[in-house]
């Protein structure tokens, strides 16, 4: 029998008994759609989830700093070190690094209505808010243009704003810091770290220009793309720093406990989802086996007549396996369409889009699994059909 005739006859049989197959087709289509969606969007979902990990411990943030004053014994003669621009550029090129934010800080004081307040002043650039997952609780946060123009703008932590002004609507207020006037533009939100909630923030360039005795940025926050990148990025930081400047007193800190917990939770969630997907596909495979066995029984006389007319065992075997393949692959094609729809919906919801290469790779894997499922589920019924005795089959009622 020619291959095209085999496909045509098998498709005709599937269409003829479509009411028998709709439950099986639906199960396989849903399983394939879920598989495609998970494979295609898994990385994008992970990236989006990582942006909010500061709320549960900052598992993807690496803190690096120079311990310029480790002990009083070796303080004398120690040359303070800081992160040079070439080092920052090198760190941004490390695979798995999303953003790098240098920070300088010092304790200072501010005057408002003849009252003096002591607090920690942090000099940051525009990337700091993204790296630490911070947002404007009231007012706004300064950005790239304010840093570039060296503006005297000030952002306050929520607790510091409450302590000085008694409320959080402080945009437009003027605060004197070390005999220089700064305009408050907003209050930062999302600061789970108490040091940030009690601190004040100014542009790094303004800090270098305006604050007497200011220091260079000697600490660094590195945000990784996903939690899978944290370990390799943490290992790469000392080598990158050493390649551009002296690295004595360099310290690298990672929230290993939080990272381990996040990975554990993620592993269980992914395992449960994939287990559910494969269970659905397994039920679809069992459904194919069941309906194909029913088809063999209901078409016993047909099989006997075909054998009596000269059909060989391999022809009967090929026909029933092809019918099983048409059923599983046809259901997979429906799953492709549903999977594409789900990918578009989730991409719109997350505001991101995976590469088409990942999507088509997931299609290939889904198709391969559908073929294996069709052959595996239809093999035994097909063998049963091909081994029927001609006389018994033609007399079957």
Image (cartoon, rainbow, N blue to C red):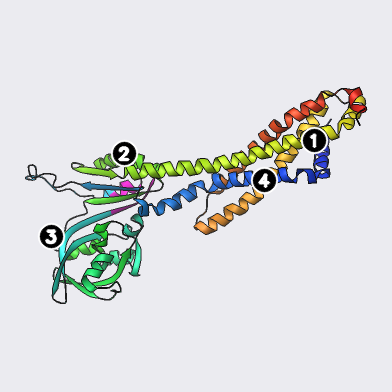
Circles 3 and 4, Cβ within 8 Å, touching? The answer is: no
* In the depicted structure, whether residue 169 falls above or below residue 26: below
Closer to us: 115 or 95: 115
Q: Distance between the residues labelled 3 and 4?
A: 67 Å
Q: Are marks 2 and 3 in contact (CB under 8 Å)?
A: no
| Tag of residue 235 | 2
* Region rendered in magenta: 88-101
| Residue corresponding to mark 3 | 213
Alpha carbon distance from label 1 to label 3: 87 Å
- Whole-number angstrom distance, CA of label 1 to CA of label 2: 60 Å
Secondary-structure class at tag 2: helix
Label located before the other in sequence (3 or 4): 4
Assign the N terminus to one quadrant of the image: top right
Residue located beneath label 1 in the image: 294
Which of these two is toward me, 140 or 189? 189
**Mark 4 sits on what residue?**
29
Residue 248: where, in percent of width, then height?
18, 41
Res 152 visible = no
Q: Which of marks 3 and 4 is in front?
A: 4
CA gap, disc 2 and disc 3: 33 Å
């Amino acid at each position: 029998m020619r291959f095209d005739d085999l496909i045509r006859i098998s498709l005709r049989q599937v269409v003829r008994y479509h009411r028998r197959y709709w439950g099986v087709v639906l199960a396989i289509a849903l399983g394939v759609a879920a598989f495609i969606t998970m494979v295609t969007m898994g990385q994008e979902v992970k990236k989006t989830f990582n942006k909010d990990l500061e709320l549960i411990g900052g598992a993807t943030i690496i803190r690096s700093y120079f311990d310029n004053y480790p002990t009083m014994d070796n303080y004398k003669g120690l040359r303070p070190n800081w992160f040079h621009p070439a080092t920052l550029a090198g760190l941004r090129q490390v695979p798995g690094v999303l953003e790098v934010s240098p920070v300088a800080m010092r304790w200072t004081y501010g005057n408002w209505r003849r009252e003096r307040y002591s607090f920690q002043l942090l000099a940051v650039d525009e990337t700091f808010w993204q790296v630490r997952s911070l947002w404007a609780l009231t007012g706004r946060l300064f950005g790239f243009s304010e840093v570039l123009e060296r503006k005297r703008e000030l952002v306050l932590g929520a607790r510091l704003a409450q302590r000085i002004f008694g409320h959080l609507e402080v945009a437009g207020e003027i605060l004197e810091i070390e005999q220089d006037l700064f305009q408050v533009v907003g209050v930062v939100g999302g600061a789970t770290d108490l040091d940030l909630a009690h601190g004040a923030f100014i542009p790094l360039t303004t800090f270098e220009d305006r604050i007497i005795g200011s220091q260079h940025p000697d600490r660094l926050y590195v945000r990784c793309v996903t939690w899978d990148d944290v370990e390799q990025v943490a290992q790469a930081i000392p080598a990158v720093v050493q390649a551009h400047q002296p690295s004595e007193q360099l310290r690298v800190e990672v929230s290993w406990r939080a990272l381990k917990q996040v990975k554990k939770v993620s592993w269980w969630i992914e395992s449960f989802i994939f287990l559910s997907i494969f269970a659905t596909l397994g039920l679809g495979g069992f459904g194919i086996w069941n309906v194909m066995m029913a088809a063999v029984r209901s078409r016993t006389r047909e099989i006997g007549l075909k054998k009596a007319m000269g059909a060989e065992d391999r022809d009967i075997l090929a026909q029933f396996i092809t019918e099983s393949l048409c059923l599983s692959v046809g259901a997979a094609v429906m799953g492709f369409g549903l999977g594409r729809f789900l990918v578009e919906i989730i991409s719109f919801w997350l505001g991101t889009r995976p590469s088409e290469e990942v999507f088509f790779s997931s299609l290939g894997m889904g198709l391969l699994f559908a073929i294996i499922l069709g052959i595996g589920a239809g093999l035994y019924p097909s063998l049963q059909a091909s081994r029927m005795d001609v006389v018994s089959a033609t007399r079957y009622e």
